[in-house]
Image (tube, grey):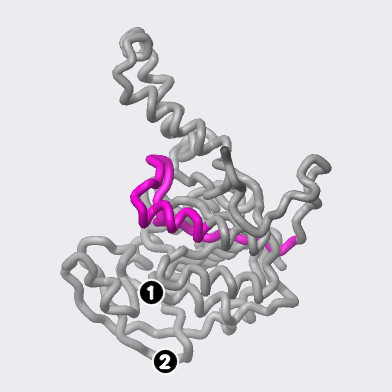
């Protein structure tokens, strides 16, 4: 594993790459859309010259070759080898052909990264399938698409990843049971923003709105900046919440899906999220947690 290298598989407009570079990492970015790759090459011309960034204008596929790729004309991040993804919600789209490589050939050429971010609209699982269980990144993230979310989670587990988090893509809050402190903090701020309680309304009028706004955006900020909409946000040890084992993550995700289906979900989360995983063994539970099952949701009440 190369401790200073991050893979940005599905670079899109380069906002994630910019964050990784700002953090001091070298980046290997993969982007199938030639226009986005060219725009990023202009944006990061100095980082490319210095050797800190390499951009591969390729797709990731099951085999080498040139294959049809569908460009979504209204949401670039929806472009995909799957026409159904690129055209969802009736979006205009068109076909191009792009050169493709198997993911194995990429990591064999450039090495195993510290963090592997994958967001390639339908082909994420191809990257995980080709990882070497004996030589894994420390951290990985992949888009959690509900249709095959549990299959993706199981594959991460089978490949050897030990700890898991499910992080919303909108607010970067973790799905946990009981809810994480970050989720409770956001829900409190949201209530303060909308309640008609006279005392709270007075608080807002006297200057409290600014504080509430900061609290609502707290999970989206880093240093003096804010993660742009559509970015993958923080990763690894910077993620909020605790690392769950596989059984607990599976049960937690299933529980939140059931809440979502029954329209009981909170304002602080939805099912547009990413699975994050770490390859190191989880720390033992604190003494006060010993004996508590982690195989399913914690019962509250």
Q: Is residue 142 magenta?
A: no
Nearer the observer, 192 or 94: 192
Residue 4 visible, this angle: no
Q: Which residue lies furthest to the right in this view?
A: 287
Q: What residue lies at 34% left-to-right and 65% top-to-bottom?
A: 36
Q: Which of marks 2 and 1 is nearer the N terminus?
A: 1
Q: Mark 2 points at which residue?
A: 65
SS of the residue under disc 1: loop
Residue occupying image coordinates x 42% and y 46% = 269
Q: In this view, does 219 lie to the left or right of 250?
A: left
Task: Say which quadrant the C terminus sits in.
Answer: top right
Q: From the viewer's perspective, is residue 204 above or below residue 82? A: above
**Image location (x, y in percent) of residue 275:** 53, 60
Q: Residue 70 carries which label?
A: none
Residue 32 is marked as: 1
Please state the extent of the stretch shown in magenta in the rendering. Answer: 253-280
The residue at 72%/68% (across/down) is 1
CA gap, disc 2 to disc 1?
13 Å
Whether residue 99 sits left or right of residue 28 in the image: it is left
Q: Which of 52 and 14 is in front in this view?
A: 14
């Amino acid at each position: 594993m190369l401790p200073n290298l991050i893979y940005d598989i599905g670079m899109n407009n380069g906002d994630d790459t910019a964050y990784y570079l700002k953090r001091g990492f070298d980046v290997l970015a993969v982007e199938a859309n030639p226009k986005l790759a060219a725009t990023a090459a202009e944006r990061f011309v100095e980082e490319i010259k210095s050797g800190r960034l390499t951009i591969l204008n390729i797709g990731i596929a099951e085999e080498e070759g040139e294959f049809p790729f569908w460009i979504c004309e209204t949401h670039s991040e929806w472009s995909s080898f799957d026409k159904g993804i690129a055209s969802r919600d009736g979006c205009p789209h068109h076909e191009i052909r792009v050169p493709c490589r198997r993911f194995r050939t990429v990591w064999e050429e450039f090495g195993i990264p510290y963090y592997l971010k994958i967001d390639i609209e339908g082909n994420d699982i191809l990257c995980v399938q080709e990882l070497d269980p004996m030589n894994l990144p420390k951290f990985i993230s992949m888009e959690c698409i509900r249709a095959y979310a549990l299959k993706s989670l199981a594959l991460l587990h089978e490949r050897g990843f030990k700890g898991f988090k499910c992080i919303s893509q909108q607010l970067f809050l973790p799905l946990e049971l009981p809810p994480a402190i970050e989720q409770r903090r956001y829900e409190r701020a949201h209530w303060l923003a909308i309640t008609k309680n006279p005392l709270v309304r007075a608080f807002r009028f006297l200057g409290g709105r600014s504080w509430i706004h900061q609290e609502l955006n707290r999970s989206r900020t880093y240093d003096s900046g804010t993660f742009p909409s559509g970015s993958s946000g923080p990763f690894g040890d910077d993620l909020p919440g605790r690392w769950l084992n596989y059984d607990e993550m599976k049960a937690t995700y299933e529980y939140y899906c059931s809440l979502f289906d029954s329209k009981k979900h909170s304002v602080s989360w939805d099912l547009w999220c990413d699975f994050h995983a770490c390859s190191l063994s989880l720390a033992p539970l604190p003494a006060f947690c010993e004996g508590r099952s982690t195989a399913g949701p914690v019962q509250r009440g």
